[in-house]
């Protein structure tokens, strides 16, 4: 049974057949020499009358009219429509088709292949419209920036920030601008270390003051200097590209903030296309992983743009390397934190809170919060511990209807920096603030941290709109010894914290650097 009939076969028709394959196809040409050359190329072709398609393939489901002669294509298309009215009719205009011929072909065809219109559409798409204005704006800002340009990810960068920094440097290189991917902090999450090491990504670790060696500065995956990065707050910014909604004014010569997409890597993938920069294997693999992680495998805050970006990247991705990045070994610290988090958990109406005490790897908190969300009956998790005079808090939510970022701002904004997304958030609280929370706070440091964080969290949770129904008679699954004597009324703690940073100017609070890190915007 012939499923595809090709009438005439010029250069475009030949290319289409090469792409489609010739199984179930028959090509009819009224030129004996052309039919012979097609057969020599491995394409099943016969000599015959192209205006009588029913004589060659009366059961064809698809008819492709594809000679280079516009008038011949018009005649064949009209005949094919009459002879095979139920077939899908695809018509190539031919070379130099007159406007009236194109109009006639469009009227009879189901699909029209018009190279002139396609080229015009592509040119217009590249030069006119909002997306093109963005591309031109980014290009102008990069060219105007003093070199070298530091493309700075947020502190302790996650895959989305890492990939975005690498991709923006590729774009800069395309237009002749010297740009270098940079970060402060640590890359401690095992998956992120694997991403950097296996792909041999040329990230530059910045120490205090190093930024003075650079002329221009671009921010990716965060939007304000000094907020979730170690740059001085007064740093002048040339470029900002981020998908997090900002909570304050964002300054820069070029600013692209789009919270409607799930990852900054999606935005950089679009810019690669706009700049006609085919992603190399390393960049494509990093960008795809960045999209996967920030959308939690396309299940969290995902958009059509994220799917489109991923689809465009897949042909260039190193699947074997990506698989190795996704399945690294867990560190002893991560397993230890996870064990403590399970043992010390408090569960109240679908919300789990747990203190793991002193930690050595803050990113282990994010991984524990993510894994504990898989526990039966748990919709919200909060995992926290302390190191180097700071309490680090990581939260996750799924299917609760709660805005976790706003809840953590309400809970901890008066005593630290807090914020994030509806389903992924974090906080950082200076340990010194606990000394101001009241004279009744006695006991070990772990007990004090547990009491302050847990009470503030559950108080904020009970006041939050759309929160799970609260039960005032709940019981803790775990409480540090002596914790019952540590209770301090919430309003007293608010009073004691007067003068502390109320978080009004904070933004992009990150509780970890990993694939599960919060990348939170306060």
Image: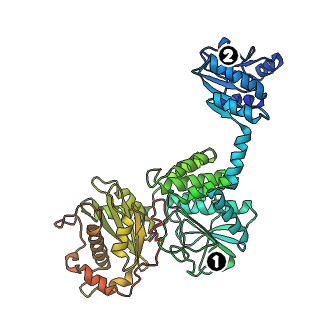
* Quadrant including the C terminus: bottom left
Provide the residue designation for mark 1.
Answer: 211
Q: How far is mark 1 from mark 2, CA to CA?
A: 71 Å
Provide the residue designation for mark 2.
Answer: 53
Q: Which residue lies furthest to the right in this view?
A: 33
Q: Where is residue 83 in the image (x, y as percent from the top left)?
A: 63, 16
Q: Which mark is residue 236?
A: none
- Visible residue check, residue 199: no
Image quadrant assignment for residue 224: bottom right
Q: Position of residue 423 (x, y in %)?
A: 39, 60
Q: Which residue lies furthest to the left in this view?
A: 473
Whether residue 401 is situated above or below residue 94 in the rendered picture? below
Q: Which residue lies furthest to the top in this view?
A: 55
Say which residue appears at 45% left-offset and 66% top-offset: 363
Q: Disc 1 on helix, strand or loop?
A: helix
Q: Nearer the viewer, residue 271 or 509?
A: 271
Image quadrant assignment for residue 354: bottom left
* Quadrant including the N terminus: top right
Q: Where is residue 451 in the image (x, y as percent from the top left)?
A: 27, 75
Whether residue 343 is situated above or below residue 497 in the rendered picture? above
Dot placed on the residue nearer the N-terminal end, 1 or 2: 2
């Amino acid at each position: 049974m012939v499923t595809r009939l090709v009438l005439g076969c010029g250069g475009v028709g030949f290319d289409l057949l090469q792409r489609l394959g010739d199984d179930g196809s028959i090509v009819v040409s009224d030129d004996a020499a052309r039919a012979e050359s097609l057969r020599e190329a491995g394409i099943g072709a016969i000599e015959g009358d192209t205006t009588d398609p029913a004589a060659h393939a009366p059961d064809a489901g698809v008819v492709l009219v594809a000679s280079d002669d516009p008038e011949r294509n018009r005649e064949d298309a009209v005949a094919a429509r009459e002879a095979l009215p139920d077939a899908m009719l695809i018509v190539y205009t031919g070379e130099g088709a007159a406007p009236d011929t194109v109009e006639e072909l469009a009227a009879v065809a189901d699909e029209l292949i018009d190279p002139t219109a396609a080229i015009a559409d592509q040119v217009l798409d590249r030069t006119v419209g909002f997306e093109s204005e963005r591309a031109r704006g980014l290009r102008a800002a990069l060219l105007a920036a003093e070199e070298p340009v530091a493309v700075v990810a947020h502190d302790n960068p996650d895959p989305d920030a890492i990939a975005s920094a690498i991709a923006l440097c590729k774009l800069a290189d395309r237009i002749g601008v010297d740009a270098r991917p940079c970060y402060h902090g640590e890359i401690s999450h095992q998956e992120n270390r694997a991403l950097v090491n296996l792909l041999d990504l040329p990230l530059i670790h910045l120490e205090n003051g190093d930024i003075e060696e650079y002329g221009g500065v671009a921010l990716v995956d965060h939007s304000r200097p000094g907020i979730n990065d170690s740059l001085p707050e007064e740093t002048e910014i040339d470029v900002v590209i981020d998908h997090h909604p900002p909570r304050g004014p964002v300054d820069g010569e070029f600013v692209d903030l789009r919270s409607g997409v799930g990852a900054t890597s999606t935005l950089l993938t679009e810019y690669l296309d706009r700049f006609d920069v085919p992603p190399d294997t390393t960049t494509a693999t990093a960008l795809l992983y960045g999209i996967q992680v920030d959308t939690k495998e396309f299940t969290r805050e995902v958009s059509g743009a994220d799917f489109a970006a991923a689809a465009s990247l897949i042909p260039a991705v190193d699947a074997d390397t990506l698989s190795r990045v996704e399945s690294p070994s867990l560190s002893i610290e991560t397993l230890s934190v996870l064990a403590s988090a399970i043992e010390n958990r408090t569960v109240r109406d679908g919300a789990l809170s747990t203190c793991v005490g002193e930690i050595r790897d803050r990113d282990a908190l994010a991984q524990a919060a993510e894994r504990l969300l898989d526990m039966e009956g748990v919709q919200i998790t909060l995992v926290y511990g302390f190191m180097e005079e700071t309490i680090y808090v990581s939260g996750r939510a799924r299917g609760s209807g709660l805005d976790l970022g706003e809840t953590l701002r309400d809970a901890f904004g008066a005593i630290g920096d807090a914020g994030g997304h509806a389903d992924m958030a974090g906080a950082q609280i200076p340990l010194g603030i606990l000394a101001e929370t009241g004279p009744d706070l006695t006991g070990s440091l772990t007990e004090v941290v547990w009491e302050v964080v847990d009470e503030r969290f559950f108080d904020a949770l009970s006041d939050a709109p759309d929160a799970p129904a609260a039960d005032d008679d709940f019981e803790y699954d775990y409480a540090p010894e002596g914790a019952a004597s540590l209770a301090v009324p919430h309003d007293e703690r608010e009073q004691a914290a007067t003068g502390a940073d109320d978080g009004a100017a904070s933004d992009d609070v990150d509780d970890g650097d990993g694939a599960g890190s919060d990348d939170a915007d306060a």
